Image (cartoon, rainbow, N blue to C red):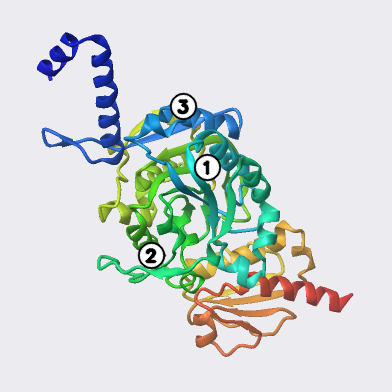
Amino acid sequence: MFKVLHYSIKIGIEDFCQFYVYLHKFITSCCLTNSLKLRGVELIPTVTVAKGVNPENAVQKLVDLLGGFKFSELSNYLPLKGKILIKPNIAHNRPAPITTNKDVIKTLITSYLTDAEEILVGDSASYPTKHIMNRSWERILEGTGLDKAVNEAGGEVVDLDQYEFVEVENPENKVLRKPLISKLIFDVDHVINVPVMKTHHMTTVTLCLKNLQGIIHDSQKTYAHLDNLHQKLVDIYRCVKDKFTLNIIDGTIAMEGHGPGLGTPVYLNTLVASPDIVACDAVGCDIMGVDPFGIAHVRLANAQGLGEGRRDHINIVGDPLDKVKHHFALPDLAISGVYERIDIYQGGTCQYCKAIVKTALESLKKKGDISLVKEMQVVVGKNPSEPSTESSLDFIVGDCACESTNCKGTRILGCPPFDAFVKIRKAVHNNASEKV
């Protein structure tokens, strides 16, 4: 190294500066991708944290921390010329924090992706949004405001469902052996993953890895939606990791409590970015006050070598975590003894059935419709106790309850029983109308 430095100085300051720039790019690139070892010591991945006064300012600060706007200046770090796909969370038809902040996406396009040849912003909405609540793609975009914002910025919003889905086989996959993935993921040069920082009633948090649910076919979205959901997410990432160049967690308007749809906004104006999806999720968890290895898909992805989840092995640049941390209220899945005039009869109930029943009841509560319930009985779980009498609203929720009890009521099949979201709410309104 000393000989190199001596040579550089000897041949002139301009040549030395050029050498330093290239050396810095190389070291930075290797450090960020965890691909360089010096004397057997592996350099750790870097996660960038940027807190702004508003979403646009947070993006500007993030880009400055990453080294500047022009890709030509970052050719060893983020060579993002060409066709770019931004993958936000557009699971529902409501704005931030339900979906990725449109101002974050717009600013990324207008300020950061100035050298890209084509910019697409695409997702596939969640299964319940499309098939249970019957929301069209047009209605979803109208509710989020993303379509207008992206068009004004010079990009195009696309529905991943309109593209062919290709079967991708990976012998290392453990749950989803052959994911059906939107072909657009493989047709672009780079994917920028931009999820929202939220809590989630089924996975505790939803960040970068969870956002991958939006790139697979609807037929696989409800498959493996129990404890194996976490490995499923890891399997999806294993098949697309070479296409995901950068991950940016949108914590400008985050969500705590009963996420991903009924929680409370948290105004952090913070972005978290890294090429390492696991490291990015780990730091995101830390900001939320959650142990990264308490989240199964983060722990599994780390263990299977898809990224670095150990916080003491991650370098953080930008704003210190103490400046941006917020102890997020996590989803509370308690359903018994919580709601007046609603009796819950539980057997061996998994967290996923609890999450769906809780979401249906919380939705009624949030909309002020819980007062319409004069009496209700919900039977859920395997081998549950049964009500001794009938009420005006009786539900048997989930395959386990439906197969292990003979009590009367509206049977809502499914594992998980996603239809319960809508069927319970509709029944409450219909019952109230009949009594008027």
Residue 232 numbered mark, or none: 2
The image position of residue 277, as x and y in percent, is 37, 47
Looking at the picture, tell me which residue is in the foreground, 162 or 310: 162
Residue located at (62% from left, 73% from top): 420
Q: Find disc 3 in the rendering and name its residue.
A: 64
Residue matched to label 1? 250
Q: Amino acid at mark 2?
A: Lys
**Residue type, numbered disc 3:** Asp
Q: Residue 321 location in percent, x, y?
A: 43, 31
Relative to 24, residue 97 above or below: below
Residue appearing at x 49%, y 82% in the figure? 383
Q: Nearer the viewer, mark 3 or mark 2?
A: 3
Q: Earlier in the sequence, mark 1 or mark 2?
A: 2
Q: Is residue 201 above or below residue 278?
A: below
User: What element does badge 1 sit on?
Assistant: strand
At label 1, the amino acid type is: Asp
Q: Nearer the viewer, residue 24 or 270?
A: 24
| Residue 396 % position (x, y) | 60, 81
Q: How many marks?
A: 3
